[in-house]
Amino acid sequence: MLKEKGKKVTYNDILKFNWYISLALIENDSVKLTERDVDFLLAMHSGIKYPTFVYDTFKDIYFTDDENRWIDMVVTNVDLLDNIYKKALAYFALSQSCIIKRPFNLFHRKNLYLRFSDVERNFGNKATWDTPFEIHFRKFVDEANQAVFSNAQQNRALNLDVFAIEGEFDLVYIDTPYISKTGVGVDYFSFYHFLEGLVNYSKWAEIIDYRTKHRKLKGNGSIWINKNQIHSAFDQLFKKFQNSILVVSYRADGIPSIEEILILLKKYKENVKELKRKNYKYVLSTNHSEEVLLIGN
């Protein structure tokens, strides 16, 4: 998060759908989805030609046929909303509904079968998976509406490369993807590509890598998950925002190491504090790790 003088700015350089969430919950300070809006979003309307892209493209990958048809209908209706903040709130509810019905809450594998396998389960929540999309959607709309309020400031949400952002900021919070000590990065673009496709529905067919079983999006990856570029990326980022308070969140057992990040941070900051949270366990991780917060001013 970038806190500009008199303003707050959020930024995510990986996924556009996160920009919509920021629009809905940070930039938006008054607009909510009404019951009439929700009823419109959840119904099929005469005179509207509903595409079947999700149904045709993702059969037996993430959701059932009926659920795929439902997604095609709702995302088409969302695009018809004439208010950007209402649209953002609807994308939030739709994306959260998709996430909660997924094993591991991810889209990294073709594994719909996990929802229906007759096996003893020690993970997930089958009751949640079996709950209809509409119920989840209405619940998340209600949660989003309750989160809309005015803080008496002008808030902005941006979707830019971090190195392209202009302006002076009081504080810059940095929470990049994590690279493990073995050199494997946490690829959020791969984990949540389906949600990115939803917010790019009209051009989704053009950006899919059809060679992959789970229909991920084309892309060369981010410097933030490249072990050969991550050190210089941190250095460049610290230099760019050296006049701001810098707050960096990272894991103690990653690349770069906390010691290496400290060295880079101290190039631009005289005073650096280190705070640790022990025994933190991440999703899909079998190891416990320290979460470290570095504050430079």
Image (cartoon, rainbow, N blue to C red):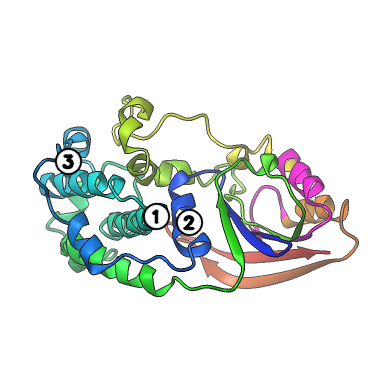
Query: Residue 147's x, y, as percent?
Result: 43, 72
State the separation of the CA atoms marked 1 and 3.
28 Å
Residue 253 drawn in magenta: yes
**Would you place residue 197 above or below residue 253 in this image?**
above
Q: Secondary structure at mark 1?
A: helix
- The answer to the question of whether label 2 and label 1 lie on touching residues, with beta carbons closer than 8 A, is yes
Residue at image mark 3: 60
Query: Residue 206's x, y, as percent?
Result: 35, 25
Label 3 Cα crowd, 10 Å radius (few <14 / some 14-19 / many 20+): some
Residue at image mark 2: 23
What residue lies at 47% left-to-right and 44% top-to-bottom? 16
**Would you place residue 189 above or below residue 212 in this image?**
below
Give the residues in magenta: 232-257
Residue 117 relative to residue 268: left or right: left
Amino acid type of disc 1? Ala
What residue lies at 30% left-to-right and 28% top-to-bottom? 205
Residue at image mark 1: 88
Tell which of 191 and 204 is nearer to you: 204
Amino acid type of disc 2? Leu
Q: Secondary structure at mark 3?
A: loop
What residue lies at 44% left-to-right and 60% top-to-bottom? 24
